[in-house]
Image (cartoon, helix red, strand yellow):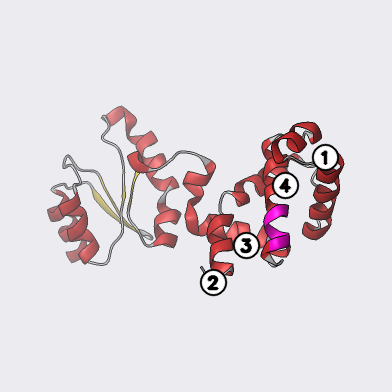
Amino acid sequence: MRELLQWRRLFDTKLVEVTEYGFAAITRLKVDDALLADVEKLGWRLVIGDPTELTGLATAHQRVTSLRSRVQSSGKSARVDEVTWSVTGLLGREAGSMLAARLLEPVLALEPERRDPLLAVLRGWLGENGSWDASAKLLGLHRNSVRRQIGLLAELLDTDLNQAQVRAELWIALQYTDELVGRGDGA
């Protein structure tokens, strides 16, 4: 009960619910940096939604809820209006890096002089929707070289690159490789 009263006082509202993951509050206050800092000093991290009318509460709740796991895993508060609403934006750096490390592990484990060109070919080929000619032109390689390297990548990754879901997951994972490659080289 003491905790509930504390949240009601901080957010100037009676619309506070203590939940299994923390608490939810609906407030008229603008959750500015000072209020956020006060809450974070207490050891809490928040997902702060957009201002909304009563009719928009369900949608606002859904958007806030979609970011809860990101805040829990990153340990950083988030504002709905500052999040990039894309797969990579919602996934977040930590989860994206874990995905990249898992899906691309065999390639990331290679020496940089082998790893980097293969990642470039994969990125180029996926970016050109699997077009051999467009990928070759983009990468400055012969189309047969692109085919050979994509075949090698399929073997290394032990996956079927003809499947759209596999290609989509790899494309997302590639968005997070820079951090992994930098760490792997001692940078």
Magenta stretch, residue numbers? 113-117
Residue that label 3 marks: 101
Residue that label 1 marks: 142
Of circles 4 and 3, which is in front? Answer: 4
User: Mark 4 is on which residue type?
Assistant: Val
For the residues marked 3 and 1, what is the alpha-carbon distance in whole angstroms?
29 Å
Of circles 3 and 1, which is in front? Answer: 1
First of labels 2, 3 by sequence position: 3
Q: Are marks 2 and 4 in contact (CB under 8 Å)?
A: no
Residue that label 4 marks: 121
Q: Nearer the viewer, residue 73 or 157?
A: 157
Q: Is residue 50 left or right of residue 14?
A: right
Residue 134 visible at all: yes
Q: Are marks 1 and 4 in contact (CB under 8 Å)?
A: no
**Main secondary structure along the magenta-highlighted residues:** helix
- Residue 5 in picture, x, y percent from top left: 16, 59
The mark found on residue 186 in the picture is 2
First of labels 2, 4 by sequence position: 4
Secondary structure category for the residue under label 4 = helix
Secondary structure category for the residue under label 1 = loop
The structure residue drawn at horizontal position 30% and vertical position 37%, both measured from the top left corner, is 50
